[in-house]
Image (cartoon, rainbow, N blue to C red):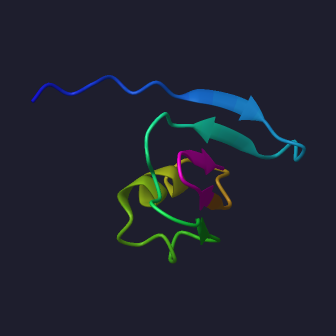
């Protein structure tokens, strides 16, 4: 099966230190998840990868978006 390219768009939020990334695909089936530090993200590849970027202090993921 051929992989489809991901289309990711970014938008600003009311918090100037936060960006919302619309992923165009399901990230979380129901509800949302919140990672307040890298230790809580252990075992979740996307969150671990994002915490590897300097100045990332928290991650919240919903159905089809990630806020950093």
* Left or right: residue 58 compared with residue 30: right
> Which residue is pictured at 33% across the width and 22% down the height?
5
> Which residue is pictured at 50% across the width and 76% down the height?
39
Q: Spot the residue most to the left.
A: 1
Q: Give residue 36's position: percent from left, percent from top.
A: 65, 71
**Residue 31 vs residue 45, the one in the foreground:** 31
Residue range of the region highlighted in magenta in the rendering: 60-68
From this view, report whether residue 54 is shown above or below residue 9. Answer: below
Task: Choose top left, top right, bottom left or bottom right for residue 4.
Answer: top left
**Residue 2 vs residue 14, the one in the foreground:** 2
**Residue 43 vs residue 4, the one in the foreground:** 4
* Left or right: residue 14 compared with residue 4: right
> Which residue is pictured at 52% across the width and 28% down the height?
8
Q: Give residue 58's position: percent from left, percent from top.
A: 66, 61
User: Is residue 14 in the magenta section?
Assistant: no
Q: Give residue 16's position: percent from left, percent from top.
A: 87, 42
> Which residue is pictured at 35% across the width and 70% down the height?
43
* Left or right: residue 3 compared with residue 17: left
User: Is residue 64 in the magenta section?
Assistant: yes
Q: Spot the residue most to the bottom.
A: 40
Q: Give residue 56's position: percent from left, percent from top.
A: 64, 53
Q: Which quadrant is home to the N terminus? A: top left
Numbered marks: total: 0
């Amino acid at each position: 099966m051929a992989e489809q390219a991901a289309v990711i768009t970014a938008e600003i939020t009311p918090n100037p230190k936060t960006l919302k990334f619309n992923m165009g695909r399901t990230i979380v089936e129901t509800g949302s998840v919140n990672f307040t530090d890298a230790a809580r993200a252990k075992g979740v590849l996307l969150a671990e990868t994002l915490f590897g970027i300097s100045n990332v202090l928290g991650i919240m993921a919903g159905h089809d978006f990630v806020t950093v």
